[in-house]
Image (spheres, rainbow, N blue to C red):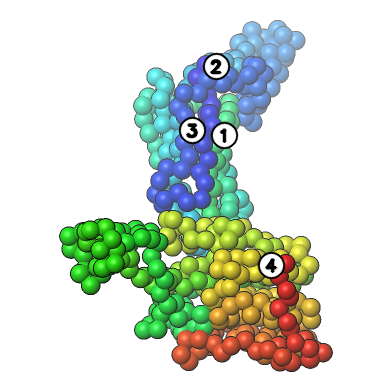
Amino acid sequence: MDGGWGGSGGTATGPGRSPGRDTGHDAARTGRRHGPLRTAFGGLTTRGRSFLAAGAAATVCAYLLGQGDLLRVGMLLAALPLVCVAVLHRTRHRVAASRRLTPSRVSARSEARVHLRLENVSRLPTGLLMLQDRVPYVLGPRPRFVLDRVEPGGRREVSYRIRSDLRGRYPLGPLQLRLTDPFGMVELTRSFSSYDLLTVVPLTEPLPPVRLGGDTGGWGEGRQRSLATAGEDDVIPRGYRRGDDLRRVHWRSTARHGELMVRREEQPRKPHCTVLLDTRRSAWTGSGPDSAFEWAVSGVASVAAHLLERGYAVRLLTDTGASVPGPDGGSLEGGSSDTAGLIMDTLAVVDHSGEPGLARAYEALRGGSGGGHEGLLVAFLGMTDEEQTVLACRMRQRADGAVALVPRGLRARSTEEEQQRLLSEAGWAVLPYTPAEPLPRLWRQAEVPGGAFGPPASGPKAGGPAGGPVDEPASG
């Protein structure tokens, strides 16, 4: 690097990096100048300024008193920091730095380790280096390291741990290095421009396997089946291949084509589930890791991970109508692991919304995959007024089975009981909770004998307080 020491920016990492991979690198070929010489003078330490002031004072006193020996001492004291400034300013260093996160996605209340590597790629050894990485205060204090002289081509590696009780996406960096002279007269600080992202996802808990409404597809003897539309079993009968079961021979096509043709085979339909998270700001009270909203976010993450492990096609839906993955909740080609990663990354940064109600979520359920019909619906609801409770009752008609988790202790007891009663009469399996309640024990209460809920109630039971039925609005 011409004229000084510094670092150039590297590329920042995104969600989805594999643990243990280098997620940021500052290139070794750095060519920025320090700037004017006065910038180097700005790096004088307290010691350097003291030497400079003492030398100037001694020089003035020697001139006034006519003391030659004192003049030489004063000039020496003043010259030493000036020489250090000039040498450090003219010294050419090229330094490369990289950062590695293990892992780059971590659960709340878990630790991650950050590995820093510094390499001197210049032909001159460096002086004493002080290394500091910038991290948000929620991850802990800023780590600082002191590195001794780094020889040409030498490397130094250091690491530190970070931990967060709050979910989120936190930037790490940029890395700052301070270069000093052997006498400690000058200290120059330069920063690399790259930073990396640490994703802290909500804490998940393993849930017990229970039989839920809407999970008949793909489970048990009575599972539904659908015709395969991809893979070896094409939409139309295909030619016979060695090893095919003769019981799959399609004789009518065989007679028409003059060769053996086998029919497509039925495959089990993958069960679907929509997990609804109510993020309305007016629906929750309190904040922090022990609040009811954070409990709900963690619960959504646990339920989504649990159902993905059971083979469900899961999508996350919020009151804003946003659906993950995809606008229609379609499964990703990468499978459940990619879906889980996308859902967790979304939950890591989800926040309160300004939506007045659940209308957009209801419209998303009506217009979703499957003609507006869901298999299983799991909803984490906040406080709802009379109108929103009725709308939630209508959502029940869009699903084969429905589980609603509602908070307790946020409003008057009579109001909460009325909300729970209306949801129960509409066919929801209502599970009231407090932030201190373990989700696995609560999840067991969602089990339904036979694995399916009864049909959604109709008539006065599914209606609002006035007793009128909650009819499905006619679609355009």
Q: Nearer the viewer, residue 71 or 413?
A: 413
- Residue 363 circle label: 4
Residue 62 placed where, x, y %? Answer: 69, 11
Tell whether label 1 touches label 2 (CB within 8 Å).
no
Residue position marked by numbered label 2 in the rendering: 3
> In the current view of this chain or complex, which residue is farthest to the right?
466
Q: Earlier in the sequence, mark 2 or mark 4?
A: 2
Q: Earlier in the sequence, mark 3 or mark 2?
A: 2
Tell whether label 4 touches label 3 (CB within 8 Å).
no
Tell whether label 3 touches label 1 (CB within 8 Å).
yes
Q: Earlier in the sequence, mark 2 or mark 1?
A: 2
Residue 357 placed where, x, y %? Answer: 76, 70
Q: Amino acid at mark 1?
A: Ser
Residue 245 placed where, x, y %? Answer: 21, 69
Q: Earlier in the sequence, mark 3 or mark 4?
A: 3
Q: Count the numbered circles shown.
A: 4
Q: Amino acid at mark 3?
A: Asp
Q: Amino acid at mark 2?
A: Gly
Please name the residue shown 56% across and 89% down the image: 454
Foreground tag (1 vs 4): 4
Please name the residue shown 41% across and 52% down the image: 19
Residue 222 placed where, x, y %? Answer: 40, 84
Q: Earlier in the sequence, mark 1 or mark 4?
A: 1
Q: Residues within 10 Å of mark 3 (few under 14, many from 20)?
A: many
Q: Earlier in the sequence, mark 1 or mark 3?
A: 3
Please name the residue shown 50% across and 89% down the image: 448
Could one spot residue 451 in this view of the protein?
yes
Relative height, residue 38 to residue 214 (above, below):
above
